[in-house]
Amino acid sequence: MTKRVLIVDDSRLARMAVIKGLGQLRPGWTYVEAANPDEAVASMRASAADVAVIDFNMPVRDGLALAGELRELHPDLPIALLSANAQEEILNRTAQLGATFLTKPLNTAAFGAFLDTATQQ
Amino acid sequence: MTQARVPLSELEIDALTELLNIGVSKAATSLRDLIGTHVALSVPHLALLSREEAAKTMTEREANALVGVHQSFEGDLQGRALLIFPEAKSLELVRAVAGGDLSLEDIIALEHEALAETGNIILNNCLATMANLLKRRVKISLPKIVHGTGETIFNIGDTSEEGDSALFLYIDFLIRDRDIRGYITMLMDMPALFALRELLREFIERTSGETRAE
């Protein structure tokens, strides 16, 4: 089944990397981009995506704060948090939100496993 | 800040910022392992400034004495990376890194070594990550320590050779439990920046799957 992925990152290049990975792993899926948490929330309110991939280190509020907001709006939304910052506190908070931690630069196998799980939901 | 003088396109600046972000994030993970407490990072800021402007910017942010751990790097990437923080926090950082109940005497005795080790972990991690992502190699010098003002810190090394302009990239970090804050910055001169631009273009191509517009 085709799904729609919300990709949130303040870096355009980082969004391009996720889009490239998605294109390789799930060529039929569609995506919508957001450059900051506010855009992401507005996008989800306008038309909810089926999966969210969120960068951690963003200005104003971080990806975990956004993941928390999206979790409240959509309790079953598969969420991946993307960061090279794999500190224990961040990993724990990601797990508490029921989200998946993915390492930057994006590893295709790990991203594929996350998308497999998202497909089953 | 005088961003208009950066001879890089918007996407190249984005790529460089993202590279630094990934490098510093990995470094923060290592620092967390070293000190056992969370290290918060800001989003990266990038500007092309003269040494004088970089020193002024640092002095505006931090009026008191500073300590810097610096390492030069050469090869496909060339420049100098610095870890800078207020000197008053230097002993607190040593305490965080060395751990345990050390006496003030022990902490003072360990200061130089602990600063060099911390700088080495952070800067090496950051530079190695960036070089790996760019698929290039860098040779990184041993860490050196400098005490002084923003001006002293930004005028280390052979300034005539390194040129007057510098790419000033910085991320500030905060160890909340210990009230330690600092900056990770990178200085590159114009020729090094032009060499870097080529590597960034290749990196963008690989990452996005898009071929060059030019």
Image (tube, coloured by chain):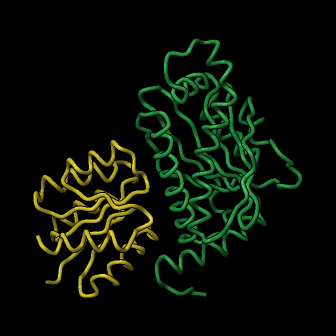
Viewport quadrant of the C terminus of chain B:
bottom right
Above or below residue A29? Residue A111 is above
The furthest residue to the right: B160
Q: Nearer the viewer, residue A113 or B196?
A: A113
Say above or below: A110 vs B121. below
Residue A49 as seen in the image, left or right of residue B145: left
Picture colour for chain B:
green
User: Which image quarter: residue A77?
Assistant: bottom left
Q: How many marks?
A: 0
Residue B16, image x, y percentages: 57, 63
* Residue displayed at 62% across by 59% down: B3
Residue at image location 72% in from the left, 71% down from the top:
B195
Kindly identify the residue that appears in the image at 21 percent across and 74 percent down.
A116
Q: Is residue A3 above or below residue B30?
A: below
| Image-based side of B132 in relation to A80, left or right | right
Whole-percent x and y of residue B185?
A: 63, 47
Give the percent coordinates (x, y) of residue A89.
33, 42
Q: Is residue B189 left or right of residue A75?
A: right
Residue B7 in percent (x, y) is at: 68, 68
Nearer the observer, B53 or B35: B35
User: Residue drawn at (63%, 69%), measured in percent from left and top?
Assistant: B8
What hue does chain A carry in this figure? yellow
